[in-house]
Amino acid sequence: MNGRRVRAMVRRNALAQVRNPGHWFLLIVLPIVDALLFGSIGVAYGDGDAPVRLLITGTMLFHLIWQVTLAGSLGFLEEVWSRNVLNLIATPLTEREVLASLGLVGLARTVVTVVLVGGVGLGFYAVAPESAGWVLVPGVLVLLAFGWAVTLMVVGLTLQYGDSAEVFSWGTLVLLMPLSGVFYPTESLPAVLEPVARAIPLTQVFDAAREGLETGRVAWGRLAIGAAGSAVSLAAATWFIDRQLRRFRREGWVTRFT
Amino acid sequence: MEEGTEVLRAEGLHKRFGATRAVQGVSLRIRAGERVGIVGPNGAGKTTTLLMLLGAVSPDAGTVDLVGHRLPGGRSEAMRRVGFAAGYLPLPDRLTVLETLHFFAELYGVERPGARVGAVLDELSIRHLAGQHCESLSSGQATLVGIAKAVLHHPRLVVLDEPTASLDPDVAIRVRDRLELLNAEHDVTLLLTSHDMREVERLTDRVVFLRDGQVIADGHPAEVVAGSGHADLEAMFLAEAARRREEQV
């Protein structure tokens, strides 16, 4: 792994994203809109500040994982849209360096989104972003690991399907949001969907966050299940991307990007 | 670089995509300072061969040693001494020419990238494009910037896929002049593909003619033409293209 090449890719990625108005919308506007939307729903229909805290914390955690996924998948798609993939292959850059740069940009985006959603919560609803307590530290790590797994899957699909895979970059997490109980216990879902929800590692983290908000305790058991699920997802995603990269060379998919 | 040193050795390359045999047993050795053109009609296997030589496509059989490094394991190390430009390939969106060249200089590990980028811009007389965004460049300008990208790191081998495709004749002449200069003054080995046989005759001192993924002739352009019984390389190319069309019909 060459740090200079990773740094160059991070800079290229950051410049491309900063100069693309679509990224500003996804990174700045949407988290603020969601925080205002759910914060106000909490105020309108809740009793006391507990529902607002729950909804703002859910919004923050959801955008955190979403931004990791977006940064990675859209970062790679940016090279596809630019038809820059072959240019990159014809340099010393390695696949690991590309992925590392996407991950670093993703982490930077999560910081922005946490600051924005936290700022809206604190500024407009007097809800502290850390109100769920210590559960947020391991919870965020589990979410980041799962988000990275989704990113690897989407990049793997993009290698095969090119920009047709764009929908997965933002759609995967949108699909998981209602199922993983970001804003409500999974018992609120139709009974037929509950087993599906339980199988998603994110569900355990959001449950643990709610427990943290309600009782102040860290639900280590739930977090452990979530961490194990994320580890399995990450292992599967690593296997998938490795397989896709080998197929990319074997099947000559590079010609789809020229 | 010492004259005669091998910069590329490919042995017995085979590649099949489904039922199509794209490349069948291509072997190629290129020495430092050579100017080699890979030619052949559409579907002859030029681009697949080139992509295998760059490590972008893995061969079903055969080996590639690029500037002393065996692919695929040595790809990253090899690409530190290999440049690549394609006439059909745009440069990254949303970056200026200066930012793009600086970015690639960093990827290639160029010492003092700022100074080197400036020098290459001057060498190719394109300093006036430095602040322009890549997506706003004309085809000719983009080709010159692509060549600048390919030579930033003092490569031993520059691979060019259709370097003057879709360029106006005057710009194409300028690009060819620059490539000749690179070879003559900087001892850069050139490996190119082109559909323009006059360009190949002018730019190369060796032609590798492909038909159906196989090498059917390899030598100085005049020797290849003499061996084919045609008047010149273009006539040979047209005859091959016609033969291929008839086969497809």
Image (cartoon, coloured by chain):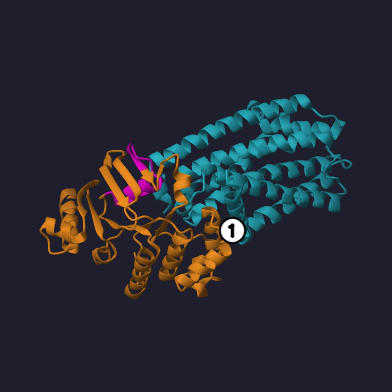
Q: Is residue B55 left or right of residue B249?
A: right
Residue lying at 73% horizontally and 33% vertically, measured from the top left: A205
Q: Which structural element holds mark 1?
A: helix
Residue B177 position within the rendered picture, expressed as x and y whole percent measured from the top left: 35, 71
Residue B223 position within the rendered picture, expressed as x and y whole percent measured from the top left: 16, 58
Q: Is residue B225 left or right of residue B197?
A: left
**Residue in front for this viewpoint, B167 or A178:** B167
Q: Which residues are magenta?
A: B45-64
Residue lying at 22% horizontally and 48% vertically, measured from the top left: B215
The furthest residue to the front? B2
- Which quadrant of the figure has residue B13? top left
Residue A53 position within the rendered picture, expressed as x and y whole percent measured from the top left: 83, 42
**Residue in front for this viewpoint, A195 or B71:** B71
Hey, what amino acid is under mark 1?
Ala
Residue lying at 65% horizontally and 47% vertically, measured from the top left: A104
Subunit bearing disc 1 = A
Chain B: what color? orange
Residue indicated by mark 1: A16
**Residue in front for this viewpoint, B171 or B157:** B157
Chain A: what color? cyan
**Residue in front for this viewpoint, B194 or A73:** B194
Would residue A184 be visible to someone looking at this image? no
Please check the rendered image and state whether residue A146 is part of the magenta-colored stretch, yes or no: no
